[in-house]
Image (spheres, rainbow, N blue to C red):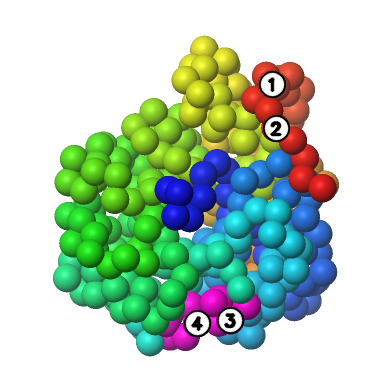
Amino acid sequence: MARIGWEGVFPAVTTQFESNYDLDVETTAKVMDGLIRDGVSGLIVCGTVGENTSLRRSEKIAVMEAAKDVSRGRVPVIAGIAEFTTAFASEVAKEAERVGLDGVMVMPALVYSSKPHETAAHFRGVASATDLPVMVYNNPPIYKNDVTPDILASLADCETIVCFKDSSGDTRRFTDTKNMVGDRFVLFAGLDDVVVESVMLGAAGWVSGMSNAFPQEGETLFRLAKAGRYEEARALYDWFMPLLHLDARPDLVQCIKLCEAIMGRGSELTRPPRLPLSARERAGVEAVMDKALRHRPALPDVGLKSAA
């Protein structure tokens, strides 16, 4: 971990759009700055929550450039890479390196359901195209390709692959990975509603969806778990859990952006094919938010400081 210094909460930043669905770079930059000022440890741009696959190549680069400008070195910035082919993904990785970001988070090749050796070859191919540190992103419910501990272990010889984000929800994989390759990879939790369990099993960081709406609560929860302050963490986790469950839904982006909008941190607008929540679904999310805000807890001291 000393090689990259990635630890703590890295919100998967939302991408903001105008009412006509054009990219709103200025508001996206404001969202990023607000998260940094609230004390998060890093940023993931152009991830799943950032609607990567709905962005044109030029828009992805614009978001990366905005993140570089906003961060000013205050926190690490990692760009998500989600493309159809290894060649396309490699091109975006090179753009992230040109922009001067701190790393890339690489998803499996989209659409194609690859065999294990093909999945490994994709990550190896992208990693070989850039000197940036690479986070391997596993999210089988969404992307249909499962990066198992066996596949990850086969990449241990690739020096630029340094981090593994798991969104499978199966926390046993952290233990299996450590048993196979020790501390070779920095482990990140990728699913909000198993974060405390993931930290207990060795996760050094958390790529979080709901921390877009509640960055201080997210960072505090993570630090409590990391410090072994489980009684305090449990109380905050119990309060947070109904919100964190929203990150595990197929419509997680709409849910997270709605919560973000309720908190006055961004717009709920998503770009098609993601459509607004139905009236019933929206009312359900609003009810969860209403209860959470009525019972919002005072946060224990974990040394959280706002960035300048």
Magenta-highlighted stretch: main secondary structure? helix
- Report if the CB atoms under discs 2 and 1 are less than 8 Å apart: yes
Tell me the kind of residue under disc 4: Lys
- Report if the CB atoms under discs 3 and 4 are less than 8 Å apart: yes
* Cα distance between the residues tagged 4 and 2: 34 Å
Please tell me whether residue 150 is drawn above or below residue 285 in the rendered image: below
* Cα distance between the residues tagged 3 and 4: 6 Å
* Cα distance between the residues tagged 1 and 3: 39 Å
Q: Secondary structure at mark 1?
A: loop
Residue 55 in sight in this render? no
Tell me the kind of residue under disc 1: Asp
- Report if the CB atoms under discs 1 and 3 are less than 8 Å apart: no
Name the residue beneath numbered marker 3.
98
Of the numbered discs 1 and 3, the one sitting upstream in the chain is 3
* Cα distance between the residues tagged 2 and 1: 7 Å
Tell me the kind of residue under disc 3: Arg
Q: Residue at x 49, y 67 (%)?
A: 104
Pinpoint residue 17: horizontal percent, then vertical percent: 74, 69
Name the residue beneath numbered marker 4.
94
Q: Secondary structure at mark 3?
A: helix
Residue closest to the eye, 286 or 135: 135
Q: Which mark is residue 304?
A: 2
- Most extreme residue toward the front is 2
Name the residue beneath numbered marker 1.
301
* Cα distance between the residues tagged 2 and 3: 32 Å
What span is in magenta?
Answer: 88-99
Of the numbered discs 4 and 1, the one sitting upstream in the chain is 4
Tell me the kind of residue under disc 2: Leu
Which quadrant of the view contains residue 235? top right
Pinpoint residue 13: horizontal percent, then vertical percent: 64, 57
Question: Badge 4 local density, few (<14 within 10 Å), some, or many (20+)?
Answer: some
Pinpoint residue 261: horizontal percent, then vertical percent: 77, 49
